[in-house]
Image (spheres, helix red, strand yellow):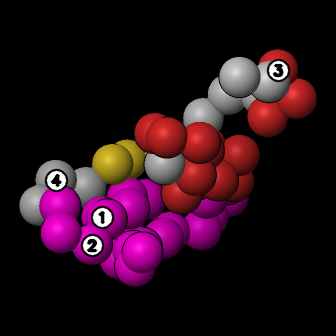
Amino acid sequence: MRFILDLEYGGDGVHGQVTREGCDRPEPFHGWLELLRVLEGPESRGNPWDGP
């Protein structure tokens, strides 16, 4: 999967928006951890150690 990442870095940290390939609506984020959460995708969210 490809992403278009609009990233701004300043005194208050990192923020911007991510647009997924094939999606017209970008997802905003604020902070590195939130960026990683957005890049994970909806199917992989959650704790992998929880099991099925």
Question: Visible in this render: residue 30?
Answer: no
* Label 4 or label 3, whichever comes before in sequence order: 4
- Residue 44's quadrant in the figure? top right
Kindly indicate whether the residue at mark 1 contacts the one at mark 4 (C-beta within 8 angstroms).
yes
The kind of residue tagged 3 is Asp
Q: Residue at x 54, y 57 (%)?
A: 39
Q: Using residue 50 as the reference point, say whether residue 35 is left or right of it.
A: left
Label 1 element class: strand
As drawn, 6 above or below 46:
below
Q: Are marks 4 and 3 in contact (CB under 8 Å)?
A: no
* Residue labelled with disc 3: 50
50 falls in the magenta region: no
Badge 2 crowding class, 10 Å Cα cut-off, few under 14, some 14 to 19, many 20 or more, is few
In the image, what residue type sits under mark 4?
Arg
- Quadrant in the rendering for residue 45: top right
**What x and y, as percent, mark residue 14?**
61, 58
Residue 42 place in picture, x, y as percent: 46, 39
Could you tell which of marks 1 and 3 lies nearer the N-terminus?
1
Q: Which mark lies nearer to you, 4 or 2?
A: 2
Q: Nearer the viewer, mark 1 or mark 2?
A: 2
Determine which residue is flagged by label 1: 19
Say whether disc 4 or disc 1 marks the residue closer to the N-terminus: 1
- Residue 17, percent across and down? 37, 58
Q: Main secondary structure of the magenta part?
A: strand
Residue on which disc 4 sits: 25
Q: Which mark is residue 28?
A: none
Q: Kindly identify the residue that appears in the image at 88 percent across and 29 percent down.
A: 49
Gap in angstroms between the C-alphas marked 3 and 2? 29 Å
**Amino acid at pointer 2:** Glu
User: Which range of residues does the magenta coloring cover?
Assistant: 1-23
Q: Dot 1: within a 10 Å radius of its alpha carbon, few (fewer than 14), some, or many (20 or more) residues? A: some
